[in-house]
Image (spheres, grey):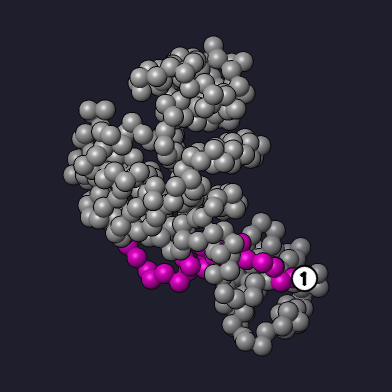
Amino acid sequence: MSVTVKNIVKNHGDIRALRGITFEVTEGELFGLIGPDGAGKTTLFHILTTLLLPDEGDAHVLGIDVIAGFRNLRRRIGYMPGRFSLYPDLSVEENLSFFATIFNTTVEENYHLIQDIYHQIEPFRKRRAGDLSGGMKQKLALSCALIHKPDILFLDEPTTGVDAVSRREFWDMLGRLRVSGLTILVSTPYMDEASRCDRVALMDRGEILSVNTPAGISREFGRPLYSVTSGRRYELLKALRACTHAHSVFTFGDEVHYTDLREDFRPEMLESYLQQLGFDDVRIEQITPGVEDTLISLMSTQDTRDPIGDDNHGHKEGTNDGYNPAIKDS
């Protein structure tokens, strides 16, 4: 296994960030951590990349304990944090050379590892990193994370804040890296990106709700799902939520996704109910549940819990939250 996590618990003061996280990632796998902001994804990545100490449990990356073997592990992992963390006053090529030097290598020696990515920004190699577009910053950060030939790559919400075209290009690049045999862990709040992973873990409020392939996650939904549309979407949403037979009602873009409690339910029953309320343009169609449908369903069945707070808070001043002091040695 490339990653083994057993019962990891992490508290930030009174905030319970991780609640007994357990999962495994196999070698060469593209594994996704999928969940909303505040789910605990960044806290978990900080532990797996030796930046944060867990309160309970243990984790091994590449067979190395993330606490006892942090020095060795840091030489073998590539990490791209959620926020752009390169030096904005250095040029593109200066940032890349700097990160290569840290790991006692050169851009020339490992250029083949990043060529597919870097050639898109190489025409701007003299430009300051801070002046790049969001998509270009993303490509530079990935190049810097790969330049030392890591054995595993951690990408924390790498496509947040970039345009749809850049998101698609980035995932195409990850697909090519995966084919090369590199193990990749990526976190994202975008449910549509789950389909690009081999397996995904659905996270919410510091817990893993399910681990499966994207298709397997969809099959876990467990009920017939219907798309309901009308020109009066807001009124439609209120009417469906007021229906005594409704099991779940959620908006998805221009659609409302609906499940019913009745075992003998037929779409005609719902259509008749809505027509009585004056909806003469309603359309009802059975659809295949997606990853987001399953995540919302699993989240809605969880017990009421104390708040997790901001997933990206990291170290808090004035608290003994276990931030790894060994980071100063690297």
Residue 29 coordinates in the image, percent (x, y):
49, 48
- 286 w.r.t. 114: above or below: below
Compared across the picture, whether 183 is left or right of 233 comes to: left
Q: Amino acid at mark 1?
A: Val
Task: Please name the residue shown 38% across and 35% down the image.
Answer: 77
Q: Quadrant of residue 173?
A: top right
Residue at label 1? Answer: 282
Label 1: how many Cα within 10 Å (few below 14, some 14–19, many 20+): some
Q: How many marks?
A: 1
- Residue 122, given in percent of the width and then of the height, sits at 59, 18
Camera sees residue 188: no
**Does residue 25 appear left or right of residue 166 in this picture?**
left
* Viewer-nearest residue: 297 or 280: 297
**Could one spot residue 173 in this view of the protein?**
yes
Q: Residue at x 50, y 55 (%)?
A: 200
Q: Is residue 143 left or right of residue 18?
A: right
Q: Which residues are magenta?
A: 285-308
Q: Nearer the viewer, residue 89 or 124?
A: 124
Q: Residue at x 26, y 37 (%)?
A: 70
Task: Identify which residue is drawn at 26% across, 45% down.
Answer: 65
**Whole-percent x, y for residue 25 in the image:** 42, 52
User: Quick one: 197 or 191, which is closer to the camera?
Assistant: 197
Residue 64 quadrant: top left
Residue 141 part of the magenta-drawn span: no
Instruction: Report the residue that reaches farthest toward the top.
Output: 126
The x, y position of residue 165, in whole percent, is 66, 37
- Asked if residue 315 is positioned above or below residue 273 in the image, the reply reads above
User: Relative to 17, is 137 above or below?
Assistant: above
Q: Nearer the viewer, residue 16 or 241?
A: 16
